[in-house]
Image (spheres, rainbow, N blue to C red):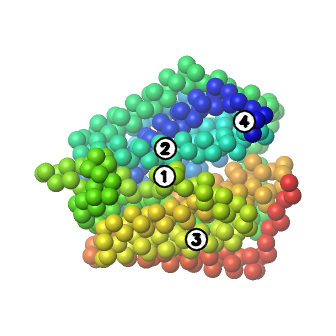
Amino acid sequence: MSNRTRFPKVFWVANSVEILERFAYYGIFMGFGMYMKSLGFDRDQLGNVQQWFLFISYFIPVFSGAFADKFGFKKVLIISYLAYIPSILFLTQFKTYQGIAFTMLSIGFAAGIFKPLISGTVRLSSDSTNKTLGFGIFYMMVNIGASVGPIVFGKMRGYSWDDAFKIAAAAIAVMFIITLALYKEPLKEKSNVSIGKKIAEIFTTVTDLRFAIFLLILGLFFWLPFWGFFNIIPSYVNDHIDTVKLFEGIRNLFGDWFARLLAREESGIWKINGEAIAHTGWIILVLQYFVSRIFEKRKAIPSFMFGLAILSLGAFCIGYSIKLAPAMVIFGIFIFAIGEMITSPRIQEYITWIAPKEKAGLYMGANFLGTCVGALLSGQYTKLFGKFENAGTPEYIWYIMAVHCLLAIVAIWLFFWFAGSFSEQAE
């Protein structure tokens, strides 16, 4: 597009700090199951911490965006950093269950403050000529950070968990410096609406009983297995897949340097780090554009239901990999990522299109509430995973997840059968 508006400096500053924040956030979260196991905690304890961590991470944005609108994005960003840095460093000091739980909740709180501010900056620093490109760049930055973080942390934990956490805190400190020196408040219209009223407006959207039930179904049948996947996949790969054979397979395909990048050495034996491959960021980074192009002309809900079937297939392949071949776990993660690329963008797009134009932002804020339902219950997957581990059948958790995703298709179909479809708004 020859007349596309150039992005202002704040756009690039915001995307730079997004990479670093996702680096720290996913570096900690994806390896957290192995960390708690190294300290002797069980899966029930891990599940409790995970579910509250995720809940706070996705509930706080319901409020923090309103505060940023009122007091300024830069001020609220700095507040998030001041909460983030000491919270991460507490992980190097607190080794009791209560201490770790408190620390992770603090990290989730800081992440929740931060979460809507960069996407908000991207929105305010783009216009009709460059908004699609702008959010594409933003999404790419998210996945770069989310992919590199677990790789670096996987390497570092081979030396010291505390050093890994210090790197995360250092990344946030760099964000603090960049923001202080370079971040300029994006231009936006001043609103006279109070913070309390803005937050109340978000919650009033769920007084529409049909919409509230729809969000609840999404929370129970989509977001719950979705978060369950990220809770358990690193530990499953690390503890139950032959990571020595996996290292050899990756080395044969991609070379020794690449395999070692994803691995650690123990007593002279190289093993793939579970968190280094057990996420979808690197796949989304490469394929999201192509998947989006394939499904952009198709209806949202049928596409979403098809994506759920793909998620189910991916979960099944991950479970069956324990019997077939270690490399199949990568194939299963790849398939699950395809399902994620279909489902997550389409359902969020759908919610914006069923909202009245003047309430699109409010409906997306309410969408966080559905996300929070799944997050708050996601620890149950971790706890069930622990029970299957104790029974010697850890792969069963993936068959449960596969069925859960198929039940989501049934639940959504029944909802529209009985409640009718929502009317999508015109352009």
For mark 3, what is the residue? Answer: 308
> Residue at 51% of width from left, 61% of height from top?
337
- Taking the image as shown, residue 285 lies to the left or right of residue 418, namely left
SS at mark 3?
helix
**Marks 4 and 1 close (CB-CB < 8 Å):** no
Residue 40 visible: no
> Residue at 79% of width from left, 30% of height from top?
190
Point out residue 348 in the picture as x, y percentages from the top left corner: 67, 57
- Marked residue nearer the N-terminal end (4 or 1): 4
For mark 4, what is the residue? Answer: 126
**How far apart in space, not on screen, are marks 2 and 4 (Cα)?**
21 Å
**Marks 1 and 2 close (CB-CB < 8 Å):** yes
Query: In the image shown, does 124 or 60 lie closer to the viewer?
Result: 124
Q: Amino acid at mark 2?
A: Ile
> Residue at 37% of width from left, 69% of height from top?
328
**How far apart in space, not on screen, are marks 2 and 3 (Cα)?**
25 Å
Task: Answer with the quarter of the image where residue 390 lies.
Answer: bottom left
**How far apart in space, not on screen, are marks 4 and 3 (Cα)?**
32 Å
Q: Is residue 156 above or below residue 280?
A: above
For mark 1, what is the residue? Answer: 281
Task: Answer with the quarter of the image where residue 288 lies.
Answer: bottom right
